[in-house]
Image (tube, rainbow, N blue to C red):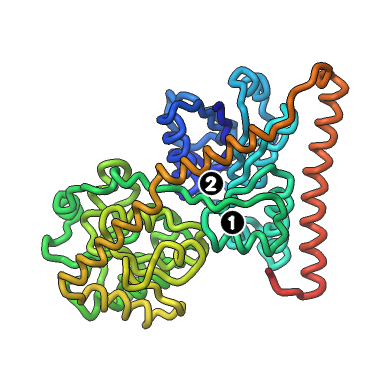
Amino acid sequence: MKILIATNTFTPHVGGVARSVEAFAGEYRHRGHQVLVLAPEFPDMPADEADVIRIPAIQNFNASDFSVVLPLHPGLSEQVDAFGPDLVHAQHPFLLGSTALRLARRRDLPLVFTHHTLYEQYTHYVPGDSPALKRFAIELATQYANLCSQVFAPSESIRDIIRQRGVTVPIDVIPTGVRVRDFADGDGMRFRSRMGLPEAAVVIGHLGRLAPEKNLAFLARAVARVAGEDPRVHFLVVGTGPSESVVRACFEDAGLEGRLHIAGVCEGEDLADALHAMDLFAFASTSETQGMVLTEAMAAGLPVVGLDAPGVREVVSDRRNGRLVHDEDEAAFAAALAATVGLPQADRRALSRGARATAVEFSMDRSAERALARYAALLERRPEHREGDEGPWTDLMKAITTEWDILNSVAGAGDAALRSDEQGRPER
C-alpha cells in the first residue's frame, strides 16, 4: 500500500500526535508499505529527511511550540501525484487536514481521520478563547469527521464521546501502540547518576509535553506533598514546554527544589534509561485521548498512578498495574502515590508485572495490524475507475464540491457555536 499521512505536528516537535505518526509510519514501512508524510516546517527539523514533504509554516504560534502552515503549497499536487497514494490519512480536522481532504477528493481516494485530540481543551492557544470557541472546535472536528471515509478513535472513551457528538461514519478504536522492545530494558542507574539522583532514592516520574492542558500544577503539588513527607522521594520530569516554570515553582514553594529533576527531551535509548530510572509513573492530565506515555512507562515495568479520565481509564487498572484515582483531589492523588511508594517489594513487583502485561496488550504490532486491515477494507470498497471519469470539467466539479463541503463544515461549526453561546447551552 501507498499511504499519505497529513499531520500538523511532526518531529522534532514533542507531542503525542507527532510520536503517533512517527510510530505508525515506521511500523508500516517495516511491513513493506510505502508512507509519505505531509507536515509543517519546524525549527531544528532533520535536514535530510526521506519520504517527508515539509510545508512552510509560521513558527511558535501564539507563543506555543506549534507551527501553523501557510495556506498555499506550490508544487504539492505534483509531489503527491509522483508518490501515487492509495489512501490519505489525516491527523487533524484543520490546516493540513483540509489539504488532506482536497488531495483525497481530487483523486477519489479514501480519507481516514484519527480523532487524536479533544480540541476544545486546547483553545487557550488561540486569542479570544471562550465557550463559543470551544463549541466551534467540537463542531468543526465532528463535521470534518463526517466528510471522511473512516474515523480512528484512540480509545473507547473518545469513540463514545465523538459518536455522541454526532459522528456518523464508521469508527474503529485503534490506539497508538507501544514498541514494547524499545522500553523493556534501560540503564536506570546511569541516568540517575547523570541527573544527580541518589541510587537509593524513590523516584516518581513523569513524561510528556509540559503544557497547561496537562494539569501539571496539580501533579507537581501532589508529588511535592509526598516528597515533603518522605525524604526518599524525588521527582523526575522528562519533557519540555511552557509549563516547566509552573512545576519548578511548586517545588520551590514547598522548599523542595533540590528534589526536582527536569531532564528535558529524551529520545531512543536515553528515554528508555530515563524510564528505568523511575520507580513509578504519575499522570494527572484529563485532556488525553489515549494513554500513549502510560503504555511506554508500563513497557518499562512502571506502575502508573493516574486520574480517571479518557485515555487513562482504558490503560490503568486499579491495583493491577497501578492506581486509578477517581476524584481530582490533590490529597487523594498524593495518598495513592504514597501508598504505592510504601508497598512491600512483592506487591510492587506484582504491579510491575501487570504493567508489562498491559503494554503487550497495547503493542504497536497489534495496533498497526488493525489499522492496515481497515485500510485494506476501504480499498476493497473503493469504486472501480471508469474510462472518461477524468477531465478538466470533472476535476473542476470535484474541487468545487470539496471547497463547498469545507466551507459548509466551518459555517456549520460556527453556527452551532453561536447558537450554543446565545442559549447558554452546556458543552457536550
Amino acid type assigned to the residue bearing label 1 in the image: Tyr
Number of the label disc, if any, that sits on residue 125: 1
408 left or right of 351 in image: right
Q: Residue at x 32, y 43 (%)?
A: 267
Element on which disc 1 rests: helix
At label 2, the amino acid type is Phe
On the image, the x and y values in percent for residue 396 come to 85, 26
Residue at 37% over, 77% down: 333
Q: Is residue 230 above or below residue 245?
A: below
In-image side of 286 versus 195 (left or right): right
Q: Is residue 315 above or below residue 230?
A: above
In which image quadrant can residue 132 be found?
bottom right
Q: Position of residue 25 (x, y in %)?
A: 47, 35
Q: Quadrant of residue 238?
A: bottom left
Q: Mark 1, residues whose alpha carbon is within 10 Å: few (<14), some, or many (≥20)?
A: some
157 or 186: nearer the viewer: 157
Question: Sequence order check: which comes first, mark 2 or mark 1?
Answer: 2
Residue 267 placement, left or right of 400? left
Between the residue at mark 2 and the residue at mark 1, the CA separation in whole angstroms equals 9 Å
What element does badge 2 sit on?
loop
- Say if 172 sits above or below 386 in the image: below
Residue position for label 2: 66
Quadrant assignment for the C terminus: bottom right
Q: Residue at x 59, y 58 (%)?
A: 159
What residue do we see at 21% from left, 56% from top? 277
* CB within 8 Å, label 2 to label 1: yes
Whether residue 259 is visible, yes or no, is no
- Report x, y in % for residue 241: 43, 54
Q: Nearer the viewer, residue 58 or 36?
A: 36
| Mark 2 closeness class: few <14, some 14–19, many ≥20 residues within 10 Å | many
Pick whichever, 239 or 146, lies toward us.
146
| Quadrant of the snapshot with the N terminus | top right
